[in-house]
Amino acid sequence: MGVLEDLMLYLASLSHDPVVYSIVFFIYAVAATTFLPIPVELGLFLSPETPFAVKALILGAGKAVGSVLVFALGGKISGGAYKLFSKNRVLRAFMNGMRWFVTKTRYFGLYLILSCPLMVDTVPLYLFSLFNQKGLMNIRWFALTNFLAGVTRAAIVFAFFYWLGIKLV
């Protein structure tokens, strides 16, 4: 059994206790944002005892906390990454394209990408933090954008399943 299945089984085993479930779901959202390349929506389907709005806020809060960690790490490693990317023509073109994209779209582009259900958060977050020009994006707005995108993503999932006639709460 894989890590994802184990995590889902563990979350399901906690679903009867909304407080414990909420704490573990928050940690899961932080982990999915920072280093687990898995969609965070899976936790929305468990714990019918926990109101959906609470799960949406927990998801957003976990994504915000995780994004602060990623933002800080991206700022620390960006200099080395730029040197590494500059040595190869293809990587240099990728770096310039990403820098242009981050500069042009900033928080709005990040919000749109992270609001897409089933989007893996780790890659876009690291790219936005890595290719962020000094002073272009700040950590407070970066975290707020992630929070809002997490809540939006939960609302999209809820609306989609409601439209299908599947009740998530």
Image (cartoon, rainbow, N blue to C red):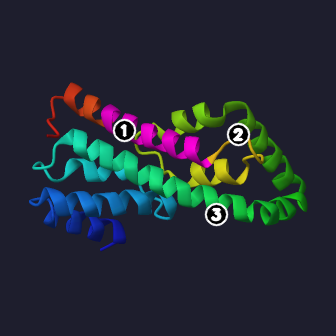
The x and y percentages for residue 112 are: 53, 33
Residue that badge 2 annotates: 102
Q: Is residue 49 magenta?
A: no
Contact flag, marks 1 and 2 (Cβ < 8 Å): no
Where is residue 141? Give x, y as percent: 57, 40
Quarter of the picture holding the C terminus: top left
Mark found first going from the N terminus, 2 or 3: 3
Q: Is residue 116 visible?
A: no
Q: Which amino acid type is shown beneath numbered disc 2?
A: Val
Q: Is residue 145 at least partly visible in the picture? A: yes
Percent coordinates x, y for residue 109 in the rendering:
60, 34
Residue 76, percent across and down? 71, 64
Q: Amino acid at mark 1?
A: Val
Q: What residue is shown at x 67% (from left), y 32% (from top)?
A: 105
> Could you classify mark 3 by the number of other residues whose Cα lies within 10 Å: few (under 14), some (14-19), or many (20 or more)?
some
Q: Which mark is residue 57?
A: none
